Amino acid sequence: MKNEEELKQEVLNRLKWDDRVDESQIEVLVDKNIVTLKGCVSTYPEKILTEIETQLIPEVKEVVNQIEIKFPESYKKVEDKEVEEAMFCLFDANSEINSNDINISVKNGKVLLQGKVNSYWKKDKIRHMVSEIKGVLSVLDQILVLPDKKVRDEELKGTLYTSMENSIHVDVSKVKIEVDDGIVKLSGILPSMASYNAVVNIVKSTVGVIDIEDNLKWVLRYRTT
């Protein structure tokens, strides 16, 4: 079990090794295994990445993300209407997304997503596409997943375990899966980020998944000193 200083250092190391994050602008505070992130970053995706990386550390109980988004001085403010137009352009260019089923509203850079899709991976893709758009400060995703056919929970659970057993990147004995009315609950401690990504991607792309409660963790294998 890591003490607070060791846990703080692991958070900083993870952020340092992720080239998408500038850890020099981030302050990490640890209190009873609750990690508070402060400081500033230049984009919304960078803010979310810091939280995801931190939450996946086994000893971390909770992450409080207080990081602010501060655009560079050379940044030209993007109006809400421009953000909305950029979103619909992306949707129209993507044949997998039906923009008629998605409602978008933007206020002061804060995006609200509503509507419906028939697969969880589409919901995830929309959220990712929107978060990458210039001018977005936050995303509230209320899109519903309504599969074309109902899959029984036990059948879905069995399909997920079988898919993971067939993956060279997953040790299925490290993963616990529970399914409740299409909501997949994941827990366990995995040996690497690659294993974590493999598990999550399998779940996201499986027919019948309505939502995901991700409580997985993964162990850092690099030297921290």
Image: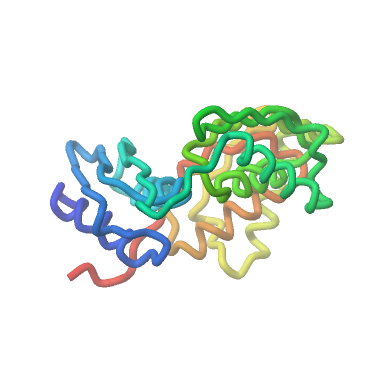
Depth check, front residue: 158 or 18: 18
Depth check, front residue: 59 or 68: 68
Q: Is residue 141 above or below residue 7?
A: above
Labels in figure, total = 0
Q: Residue at x 26, y 45 (%)?
A: 39
**Residue 188 visible, this angle:** no
Decide if residue 74 is on the left or right side of residue 61: right
Q: Residue 129: x percent and y percent?
A: 63, 49
Q: Residue at x 35, y 45 (%)?
A: 70
Q: Residue 131: x percent and y percent?
A: 55, 45
Q: Residue at x 17, y 70 (%)?
A: 225
**Residue 33 visible, this angle:** yes
Q: Quadrant of residue 207?
A: top right
Residue farthest to the right, as pictured: 148
Depth check, front residue: 141 or 107: 107
Decide if residue 65 is on the left or right side of residue 114: left
Q: Is residue 105 above or below residue 56?
A: above
Q: Residue 181: x percent and y percent?
A: 69, 27
Decide if residue 217 is on the left or right side of residue 106: left
Q: Residue at x 50, y 65 (%)?
A: 194
Q: Residue 42: x percent and y percent?
A: 39, 51
Scheme of colours in the image: rainbow
Q: Is residue 203 above or below residue 84?
A: below
Q: Quadrant of residue 139?
A: top right
Decide if residue 196 is on the left or right side of residue 98: left
